[in-house]
Image (cartoon, helix red, strand yellow):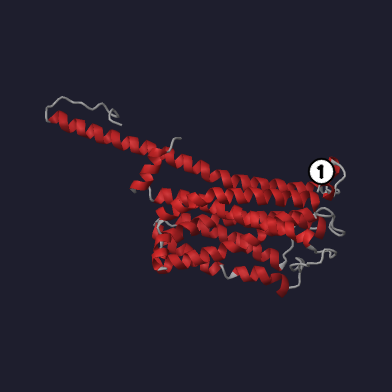
Amino acid sequence: MWLWFSKLGSPKWFYELSGKWLPWLVAFMVVTMTIGLIWALLFVPEDYQQSFTNRIFYVHVPVASISLAVFPLMAVAGAITLVWKMKLADMVAKCAAPIGVWFTGVALATGAIWGEPMWGTWWVWDARLTSMLLQFFLLIGVVALRSAIESPDAAARACALLSIVGAINVPIIKYSVEWWNTLHQPPTPLSMDAESANGPEIWVPLLIMIAAVYCFFVISLILSTRNEILQRERRSQWVMDIVAAERV
Amino acid sequence: MLDGIVFTSFSEFLQMGRYAFHVWTVYILFTIFVVVNLTLPGIQRRQFIREQKRRAQRDTQTRTSENSTASSTENTGSTGAPGESV
């Protein structure tokens, strides 16, 4: 276990292993995303209240729910950085922050575009929306903090702390729709009954899209972490070998 | 399988029951999001490799010219035009 742990912490090992995973992850993402998008756009029946804006659901919900995974991930990576000083954990945390900004931003934007026809407004200071906006600014804060501190070690420690503190916001976002009864609706219970309005024909494509978007998140995180590894290990022989072997 | 499609024509599909603007804006935004996040790391990687190659070349050049200055002071014929031994 400890051997595995320390091996996992080696950037070179991660670089090689992720290189082997990437083609499979990309293939899985392409397949699930194609099926999910076609299913969501063409086959999901029109909602009796929302008409065809229910198509937005299949983008908004996966992106928003995965954006909630970013802070816990950064907090765990941050804790590992603080306790064991594992270089790889800090690289993952560093790369996750800007991706999280994207996810949160797209979740907010798609939510606003959905809110306009359904709620009659682009934005309200509802608990869910406000806590999500807070996450957006916290993530921008982490990115800014990283670039503001010159010493990489100090930056890593500061960002790790901010990530752990910022992760407190995640349960607030998650349960905001249950704690405060404002505009954003609580999650809809899934039903196995094919006749129900929330039957499998509604949520199976959603699960497929969630799998696809999760995979997309993992791929983009791996890709930028690999770049970060090359950048930080550029003086080591194995990176020099990669540079020499690659044609650009 | 195809009769599961809820639209009867392509234009009906594009209209999305008068929500064309909202639905398609969301899907275009999502497409941009996915494409940018998957291509940007590739561009950055190429940039990095190019930069490192240039640096490696420069290092070899300086090393060669240092060697050649050293050898010319020792009054053996200078061999190294910079970059010759790259």
Q: Judge the density around disc 1: few (<14), some (14-19), many (≥20) Cα neighbours within 10 Å.
A: some
Name, please, the residue furthest toward the bottom.
A179
Q: Residue A9, located in which quarter of the rendered image? A: bottom left
Chain name for mark 1: B
Secondary structure type for disc 1: helix
Label 1 belongs to which residue?
B14
What is the x, y in percent for residue B24?
76, 46
In the image, taking residue A198 as reference, residue A11 lies left or right, namely left
Q: Which residue is drawn at 52% across and 46% down?
A: B41
Q: Residue at x 74, y 48 (%)?
A: A38
The one of A142 and A73 positioned closer to us in this rendering: A73
Whether residue A232 is visible, yes or no, is yes
Q: Which quadrant does the N terminus of chain A fall into?
A: bottom left
Whether residue A111 is visible, yes or no, is no
Q: Residue at x 86, y 44 (%)?
A: B12
In the image, taking residue A217 as reference, residue A179 lies left or right, namely right
Compared with A130, B11 (above or below) is: above
What is the x, y in percent for residue A162?
51, 65
